[in-house]
Amino acid sequence: MSDDSGCRRAGATPSAAAGSGVPADGATGPLRLRRPRPEDLEALAALEARSYPPDEAAPREVLADRIARAPACFLLAEGEDGALLGFVCGTRSAAPTLTHASMREHDPAGASLCIHSVVVDPAHRRRGLGRRLVAAYLERVGRDLSGVERVLLICKQHLVGFYEQNGFRLVGPSSVVHGRDPWFEMRRPLCPAGEGPRPPTAPRQA
Ligand SMILES: CC(C)(COP(=O)(O)OP(=O)(O)OC[C@H]1O[C@@H](n2cnc3c(N)ncnc32)[C@H](O)[C@@H]1OP(=O)(O)O)[C@@H](O)C(=O)NCCC(=O)NCCS
């Protein structure tokens, strides 16, 4: 990809070990990844409701809409027994920054991929699954979606480091009001498979 893409080649992405067939859950079993099906809605909605406060969780019908309209922006991980371990979902937007409207819209040609939920089953947290899931998601969308230039999300302050581990950089406080806490916007170029985001360049000395 060209220099102004924000991407660089040669093993820069941490996602290489995140695809199918690598240890999931930090240590055990293969990580099985797939797009959601309509029959996954109950389990997805239940995990979303367990993972976010009521005023932040996406309602069932919003998740159903994302499954139906933006399945290529949705990835779930399941255990060998088929139980849901976690998921990432998003939609595309033409806006260059994440707005409240992006949570309800999907523009199939939008150059921004806005991530709305990153969720790991509470019983499987802090074992590296979330980081692997985000890495696998970035790898998949980089492979499957054309015309996406950047990935955007908003997160709470304590998770800035979690996303930085997958190549996102902090843009600053978000204008989005959603629930009670302030949100911070994170951004990352979407790089093709085999490429990762370039590290930030140091300001030039005068
Ligand atoms: C956020 C979430 C997806 C992380 O999943 P996870 O599998 O526990 O994350 P990982 O084990 O891959 O974490 C990797 C690293 O990210 C950071 N991290 C993860 N969760 C963190 C937290 N709650 N607070 C601070 N840092 C965190 C840590 O540096 C962690 O490494 P460590 O465990 O060695 O300290 C999970 O806690 C979750 O589902 N939370 C509820 C939903 C939510 O808030 N999603 C994010 C919306 S923006």
Image: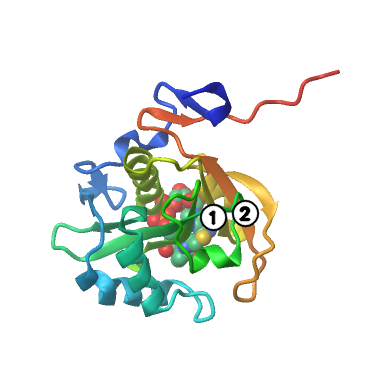
What residue lies at 23% left-to-right and 41% top-to-bottom?
22
Instruction: Tell me how far mark 2 sits from mark 1, CA to CA.
Output: 6 Å
**What percent of the width, then of the height, locates residue 106?**
44, 61
In this image, 154 relative to 139: left or right? right
Q: Amino acid at mark 2?
A: Glu
Please name the residue that numbered disc 1 is placed on.
153
**What percent of the width, then of the height, locates residue 141?**
36, 44
Q: Quadrant of the C terminus?
A: top right
The residue nearer to you, when weighing 8 against 73, is 73
Looking at the image, is mark 2 or mark 1 earlier in the sequence?
1
Taking the view exactly as shown, the residue that stands out farthest to the bottom is 54
Please name the residue that numbered disc 2 is placed on.
185
The residue nearer to you, when weighing 62 against 166, is 62
What residue lies at 46% left-to-right and 39% top-to-bottom?
190
Instruction: Say if 72 sits above or below 139 in the image.
Output: below
Can residue 126 be spotted in the picture? no
Q: Would you identify the image quadrant in which residue 39 lies?
A: bottom left
In this image, 194 relative to 184: left or right? left
